[in-house]
Amino acid sequence: MDRNEQKGISTYHSFQIYEAEIPNLKFEIDGVTTTVDMGAQMSYHTGQDSQMHDLVISGNNRAVTLKDNIWRSVQLPQQIAITRATQLEFTLDYAKAYEELYIGFDDDLNRDNAKTNWQLTGSKDGSSTHFHKPFGGRTSSNIQPPETTRDYKIPIGNWIIGNYTYLNLIGEQDANEGAGGEATFANFSIYEVGWARL
């Protein structure tokens, strides 16, 4: 810069740093719409959760999106009693492929002491020690392919019974396995089959 050239001056003011509010998720329990506090997300398995992204709410607070490698739990508004007649219903928009994609419940946030999560889809087979596979393995024709949307009704009482406090949403995608996955769950409903819309 020439010595005689006037130097520019910039003025910054009114800085604000704050935590953005995360909208709640609407979750239907036995026909009653409740709200899940998504601002209190927890890592379900700290050794796996990259913590690069939060779960993102959309669709009139009825949808939640997972991106990249993410293992999260959120506390439900009330404890859910799962019986032999309990069914879980939701829609899955599977935008980008995951290695493994799961949904499940827990009562103590310990993945290792009980098998309470279900593999929905993915390019790899998850551990049979930790996860149920109601739709078969990765080569099964029942596995949902990427870039599709599907409605699910899972009779979860066929696999677990008891009282559960947390909802788990898990997208497993290691950094060395290519582009991150993306999936959106919407219109959650859990109910007793004898009571419900079936």
Image (tube, helix red, strand yellow):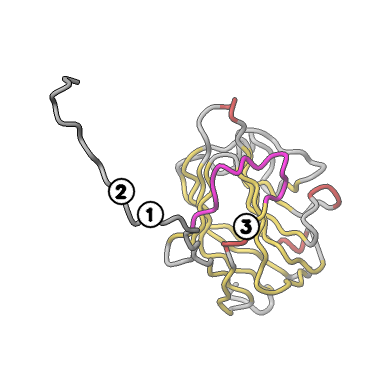
Question: Residue at coordinates 55% horizontally, 77% vertically from top-left?
Answer: 33
Mark 1 packing: few (<14 Cα in 10 Å), some, or many (20+)?
few
Q: Which residue is mark 3?
A: 41
- For discs 3 and 2, the disc positioned in front in the rendered view: 2
Residues 133 and 56: in front is 56
Are circles 1 and 2 on residues that touch, CB within 8 Å?
A: yes
Instruction: Find the distance from the CA under tag 3 to the CA under tag 2.
Output: 34 Å
- For discs 1 and 3, the disc positioned in front in the rendered view: 1
- The kind of residue tagged 1 is Phe
Are circles 3 and 2 on residues that touch, CB within 8 Å?
A: no
> Which corner quadrant holds the C terminus?
bottom right
Instruction: Find the distance from the CA under tag 1 to the CA under tag 3.
Output: 27 Å
Mark 3 packing: few (<14 Cα in 10 Å), some, or many (20+)?
some
Mark 2 packing: few (<14 Cα in 10 Å), some, or many (20+)?
few
Residue 71: x percent and y percent? 65, 47
4 lies left or right of 75:
left
- Secondary structure, mark 3, is loop
Q: Is residue 16 above or below residue 164?
A: above
Question: Residue at coordinates 30% horizontally, 48% vertically from top-left?
Answer: 12
Q: Which mark is residue 15?
A: 1
Q: Which residue is mark 2?
A: 12
Q: Which residues are magenta?
A: 43-56
Residue 99: x percent and y percent? 61, 35
- The kind of residue tagged 3 is Gln
Residue 94: x percent and y percent? 50, 46
Mark 1 or mark 3, earlier in chain: 1
Instruction: Find the distance from the CA under tag 1 to the CA under tag 2.
Output: 8 Å
Q: Is residue 4 above or below residue 198?
A: above
